[in-house]
Amino acid sequence: MKGKLVILIGPPAAGKSTWLYQFSGEVISTDDIRRQEFGVQFDQRIEPAVWHLAYERLEKAIRSGKDVCFDATNTTRNRRKPLIDIAKKYGVSVEGVVFLWELDVLIKRNRERPPGKKVPEEVIENKLQELEVPSYEEGFNKIEVFR
Ligand SMILES: Nc1ncnc2c1ncn2[C@@H]1O[C@H](COP(=O)(O)OP(=O)(O)OP(=O)(O)O)[C@@H](O)[C@H]1O
Ligand SMILES: [Mg+2]
């Protein structure tokens, strides 16, 4: 049996991980990998290893036939392409869930987060600026928008 791949798309503090509370499949989270495997919130030096592990886990989960959600900011087409490619390789349908909130909403939510979960505000600004809204041309079978 084939599952589906859900790709969450949005800057930090947009509500991606909150969306997961009602998702029952397997979750691949680059934040979880950073914390659980490397003991950091973020460190540029481990990024290649984090992504290598994330792609490996994604392919394994898709191959097993489960529904899978990839939880990262996934703000650019370049970031999404390898995920979509893996899904297509196994004939799995791909859903994009995109969170389109204004900067002031994101900053406010981030300020209300517990200390260990706060992200530098310039990171939120940069991620919001680089955000490329997903399109069906990328290979999505469905796109859902929250705003
Ligand atoms: N729709 C919403 N309305 C109000 N607050 C929300 C909403 N969605 C999420 N939040 C709150 O905003 C904060 C950030 O949400 P969340 O952790 O889901 O973001 P995220 O997109 O996963 O961020 P990151 O990329 O940093 O992991 C949390 O404190 C959460 O409770
Ligand atoms: Mg999150």
Image (spheres, rainbow, N blue to C red):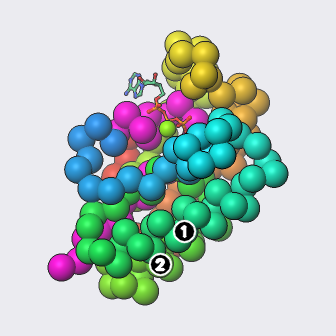
Magenta segment: 1-19
Q: Position of residue 37 (x, y in %)?
A: 59, 49
In this picture, residue 105 sits left or right of residue 44: left
Query: Mark 2–mark 1 contact, CB under 8 Å?
Result: yes
Residue under pointer 2:
86
- The image quarter containing residue 55 is bottom right
Residue 89 in view here:
yes
Closer to viewer: mark 2 or mark 1: 1
Q: Examine the rendered structure and indicate whether residue 96 appears above or below residue 140.
A: above
Residue 94 in view here:
no
Q: Position of residue 131 (x, y in %)?
A: 62, 49
Q: Residue at x 37, y 69 (%)?
A: 61
Q: Amino acid at mark 1?
A: Tyr
Q: For the residues marked 2 and 1, what is the alpha-carbon distance in whole angstroms?
A: 9 Å
User: Mark 2 falls on what kind of element?
Assistant: helix
Mark 2 residue crowding within 10 angstroms, few (<14) / some (14–19) / many (20+): some
Q: Amino acid at mark 2?
A: Ile
Residue under pointer 1:
55
User: Mark 1 falls on what kind of element?
Assistant: helix
